Image (spheres, rainbow, N blue to C red):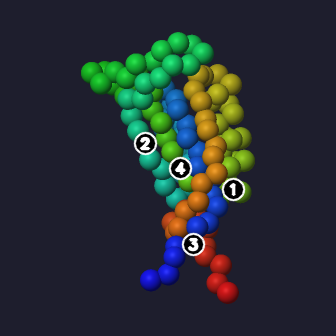
Amino acid sequence: MGALTLHPMKEIRVIVAGEHQPFVTELLDQVKATGYTIIGNVSGKGHSGVREAHFMFSEQESLEMIMTIVPEEKVEPILAGLRPLFERHSGMMLVTDVAVSRQEYFGKKEKRA
């Protein structure tokens, strides 16, 4: 069996209040991200202090992390779409380089020789 080939992509992680999670996921759907993962009840500390996970309350009151992997050309439309959210509300976003073995799962067709 041959070695896996890795393909460069971008991972975007967005952490926002739960009430803003639909805004983020609708944006990802609009730019045709092939999928995303949501992790709820995220805790952390930032410039506005400590935010604790609230397992007893609704997800609207907690922080959520939405993660997606996209081809590089989708990063700028996602950043542009998130700009209005971050201008008015707290949250954070990370964009990192990643490599995937099945690029067709992330919206990029394999190039045939």
* Residue 70 percent coordinates (x, y): 60, 56
Q: Residue furthest top?
A: 49
Q: CA distance from mark 3 to mark 4?
A: 20 Å
SS at mark 4 in the image: strand
- Amino acid type assigned to the residue bearing label 1 in the image: Glu
* Residue 62 percent coordinates (x, y): 41, 24
Q: Mark 2 vs mark 1: which is more N-terminal?
A: 2
Give the residue number, with chain letter if any, for mark 3: 5
Q: Nearer the viewer, residue 49 or 5?
A: 5
Q: CA distance from mark 2 to mark 1?
A: 21 Å
Give the residue number, with chain letter if any, for mark 1: 72
- Amino acid type assigned to the residue bearing label 4 in the image: Thr
Q: CA distance from mark 1 to mark 4?
A: 12 Å
Give the residue number, with chain letter if any, for mark 4: 68
- The relative height of residue 55 versus residue 106 in the rendered view (above or below) is above
Q: Are marks 3 and 4 in contact (CB under 8 Å)?
A: no
Q: Residues within 10 Å of mark 4 (few under 14, many from 20)?
A: some
SS at mark 3 in the image: loop
- Amino acid type assigned to the residue bearing label 2 in the image: Ile
Locate residue 16 relative to residue 86 in the image: left or right. Answer: left
Q: CA distance from mark 2 to mark 4?
A: 9 Å
Give the residue number, with chain letter if any, for mark 2: 38
Q: Residues within 10 Å of mark 1 (few under 14, many from 20)?
A: few
